[in-house]
Amino acid sequence: MNDAVRVEDISVSFGDSTVLDGVSLRVPSGSITAVIGPSGCGKTTLLRTIAGLEQIRSGRIEIGGVEVASVGADRERRVDVPTERRSFGLVPQEGALFGNMSVAGNVGFGLGPWWRRTPGRAARVSELLEVVGLSEFRGRHPGALSGGQRQRVALARALAPRPAVIGLDEPFSALDAQLRTRLRDHVRDTILAEGASGLLVTHDRGEAMAMADEIVVLMAGRVRQVGSPEEIYLEPVDVEVARMFGEVSELPGDADGDVVRCPAGSLRLRRPARGSGTVLLRPGDLDVVTSPDGSELGRARVLTVRPCGEHIEVRVSLFAADQARRDAEVELLVRAEPEWAGSPGDQIAFRQRRPAHFCPAS
Ligand SMILES: Nc1ncnc2c1ncn2[C@@H]1O[C@H](COP(=O)(O)OP(=O)(O)OP(=O)(O)O)[C@@H](O)[C@H]1O
């Protein structure tokens, strides 16, 4: 598959400070890649650099198979295609629409200045308003739209000139949770149906996991991990990435091939490993045993019970093997079926439901 975006080993600095340090990533054509990372890790800078709004100090960038930026090892700038000639449509944070133009005017602006009579301009604007479901709002001004509608106008404006790639910068951060969830699917479907690919930057793991085919974890200007949402959730490269992608229990362990010994017992591993390190358990990795059948790993005391719809999340405390060392108590998250009726203070048995993930000590 061709890549809609290919970023190779780019570095970007502001004065003395290096904000992106040897970053590489790709967006395969017809897919969406999300870049996720904590505030200040360089997400917006990365998007602006691909768009041509910041310059690289080294590396190279290709969009739609065309080299748009490149700096050689000798630091000589070889290629630097201006923003408007890169096939990249940027949807900035909170849309950044023109308040004095109508919805149709904003979308048409994506095709170039209004006085330029691009052939088929009116038809393309109508088509896009239809696609984003805003045909009846074409004459309105952005001030009279909801946050979600404004984002859809911003997306239509970015899609207007048929770019190879749409870059989305925290597109839903100003919207409420319900609307955010609905718009995710709509935006993903629209981008792909228009034949474009997407590069989403966000700090919201739910957004990245719901929208992206591939996730790039960026930390302090460097790529820490690249993988599918499932890989990053179940096999994070380290504890920091694991925590970023949801609740996780961290236990010290000693791995020996397919098995790791830890305070929760001897657990099967997803991948063979050796030596000491940290066992990372997602809530769905262990579950509460309601009818004992010999597969139990151990017993624990219930601390808290949290119903989550499809299942119940139960925080438990393991009984320290050594009764003299009560301070060695370990907390774990386990999952129970919705019909389970336990409460804090109860004793439960638990078993392993899914192989565990292990990060060797570095
Ligand atoms: N034009 C600039 N001049 C100097 N420093 C800048 C400039 N733009 C960004 N920075 C710095 O670069 C770093 C990365 O900023 P960037 O906005 O890319 O991060 P981010 O991951 O998008 O953060 P957030 O999630 O908070 O938006 C920050 O330390 C920021 O202060």
Image (cartoon, rainbow, N blue to C red):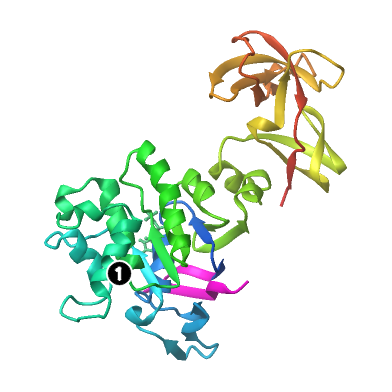
Q: List x then y, in percent, for residue 332.
A: 66, 26
Residue farthest along the left direction in this orientation: 100
Q: List x then y, in percent, for residue 362.
A: 71, 52
Q: Residue at x 60, y 15 (%)?
A: 303
The type of residue carrying mark 1 is Arg
Quadrant of res 277: top right
From this view, report whether residue 198 is shown above or below residue 357: below
User: Magenta residues?
Assistant: 1-22
For residue 356: magenta?
no
Q: Identify the secondary structure beneath mark 1.
A: helix
Q: Nearer the viewer, residue 78 or 189?
A: 189
Quarter holding the N terminus is: bottom right
Q: Nearer the viewer, residue 326 or 66?
A: 66
* Residue that carries the numbered disc 1 in the rendered image: 124
From this view, report whether residue 70 is shown above or below residue 234: below
Q: Nearer the viewer, residue 25 or 192?
A: 192
Q: Main secondary structure of the magenta part?
A: strand
Residue 246 is left or right of residue 129, and the answer is: right
Q: How many marks?
A: 1
Q: List x then y, in percent, for residue 344.
A: 59, 10
Q: Residue at x 65, y 20 (%)?
A: 337
